[in-house]
Image (cartoon, rainbow, N blue to C red):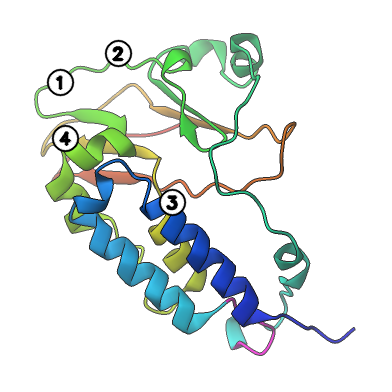
Amino acid sequence: MKEHINNNEIKDWYLNTFEHINNNLNGNGKLPLSQIRKDAIARFMELGFPTTKWEDWKYTNISPILRHQYSLEKISSMVSLQEVKRYIPKEYSENIIVFINGEYAADFSSINLYKEGLSITNLKEALYAHWEDVHQYISKYANFSHEPFTALNTALAQQGVFIKIPADLELKDPIHLLYLSDAADATFQSHPRNLIIMGKRSQAKNF
């Protein structure tokens, strides 16, 4: 079957959604990251979604997922603590960072690692507390110049984990990142971005 994607219409929908979200960031729009987001959505508009005409995507037809306009707004969830515990091994009951529907779930998270210079938080908090690190590294390795999905994620990312480990620190206990999605109320998409900065000779592991 021949692939057909109305790329311009889809791109315009994402652009309009980005502008709506960006206008309701409650101050985040004034942070240095705001310009990176704008640059990322502009690059996405130039690239558009990949089609099978692209060499790297010639065996992957994404047109089925582009027929849906998944909500990008915050979606409520009825996920309970008991349900969350199903996905947490008993031997790793601490140092867990939980995200539900792309949003940081503080009530279900537990961080018990306290070392000098160590920072573990969610990206939304880090935008203020560690804005210089976020601005420096958020798109340094996840380059969006040629990757439309990376560009879209950079433009729309509001949550994720932020971990900064100072030089020479070895974390022997693992950090468990748990992402759960509950689409009971609506179809949606989330764009988390994890930013992990490790100093020289530092060590850590996740589970």
Q: Is residue 76 above or below residue 163?
A: above
Disc on the earlier residue, 3 or 2: 3
Give the residue type at disc 4.
Answer: Ala
Count of numbered marks: 4
Circles 4 and 3: CB atoms closer than 8 Å = no
- Region in magenta: 49-54
Give the residue type at disc 2.
Answer: Asn
Tell me the CA gap for discs 3 and 2: 33 Å
Q: Relative to residue 33, is residue 70 drawn left or right?
A: right
Disc on the earlier residue, 1 or 4: 1
**Disc ID at residue 115:** 1
Query: Magenta includes 200?
Result: no
- According to the picture, the residue beneath numbered tag 2 turns out to be 112
Q: Nearer the viewer, mark 3 or mark 2?
A: 3
Tell me the CA gap for discs 3 and 1: 36 Å
Q: Is residue 84 above or below residue 25?
A: above
- Res 141 visible: no
Give the residue type at disc 3.
Answer: Ile
Could you say which is closer to the camera, residue 117 or residue 169? Answer: 117
Q: Residue at x 66, y 15 (%)?
A: 83
- According to the picture, the residue beneath numbered tag 3 turns out to be 21
